[in-house]
Every structure is written in structure tokens, then in C-alpha cells.
Image (spheres, rainbow, N blue to C red):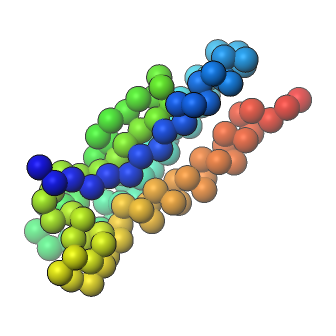
Amino acid sequence: MPSISVKMDVANAISKLKKYDLIKIEQTKKALKEAATNVENRAKKIVPVDTGILRASIRILHARFDQLGFEVGTDVEYAASVEFGIKQKPSPYLHPAFELAKHELIPKLSSIFKRT
């Protein structure tokens, strides 16, 4: 089944996180959960709506917060056509939502791991 999604995977940071205490790891998981929810909610707000099927289908597909990653997307067949403009003018919704969440997440992670 066709699908479209965006992923954030910082699993390679796990080895570095082991140097930090569990509080920082839990704070990172919390920040990632918030980012995933923000991507989902923002994508739903900006996706063009005809029948509402695409908007209703946008969700957190895989939440691997224990591995420090998440995937938000949809499995609606025409989702990529809407995002990238296949057979129509593009109406990006998923990548703009992801970029906003990413730019909010980076300072949060920097704050968590800021050296004292």
C-alpha cells in the first residue's frame, strides 16, 4: 500500500546518551514525543481538505521513543500526490510540519545536553 511519511531517527545518539544520566534520556524521550505530536497536529492543520480522509489518516505511525525516533505519516494512496504535486499542484503539509517541529526540537535537545 502506498504511503508517505517523515522520520526522525537519532538512534546513533544512544551510545552518546549512555554517558549521561537517565534523567536526560527521559527528557529526550519526552521532547521527541512532543515533536511527534506537533508534526501530527500541524500536518492535520495545513493539509488541504476535500473529503477529510487524508487529514484523518495522518498519525504517528511508529513511535520508537526508547530508541529515540518517530515516524509520522499516512497510508492514504493519494497522500504523496498532494504533498509533492503528482498530477496536481503540490500542497506540502507533512514536510513543513516536520521542519517546524525539528527547528523547535533542536534547541530543546541542546538545552537538555547543555554542559554545566
| Residue at screen point 73% across, 41% down | 110
Horizontally, is 51 left or right of 106 in the view? left
Instruction: Measuring from the top left, give residue 81's x and y in whole percent.
Output: 21, 71
| Residue at screen point 13% across, 59% down | 77
Camera-nearest residue between 6 and 110:
6
Horizontally, is 40 left or right of 15 in the view? left
Relative to 61, residue 77 above or below = below
Horizontally, is 102 left or right of 81 in the view? right
Instruction: Measuring from the top left, give residue 54's x and y in whole percent.
Output: 18, 61
Residue 73 appears anywhere in the view? yes
The quarter holding residue 87 reads bottom left
Relative to 36, residue 18 above or below = above
Instruction: Measuring from the top left, give residue 91's x and y in whole percent.
Output: 31, 76
Instruction: Measuring from the top left, give residue 28's x and y in whole percent.
Output: 59, 31
Horizontally, is 87 left or right of 91 in the view? left
| Residue at screen point 27% across, 55% down | 4
Residue 57 appears anywhere in the view? no
- Taking the view exactly as shown, the residue that stands out farthest to the right is 116
On-image quarter of the C terminus:
top right
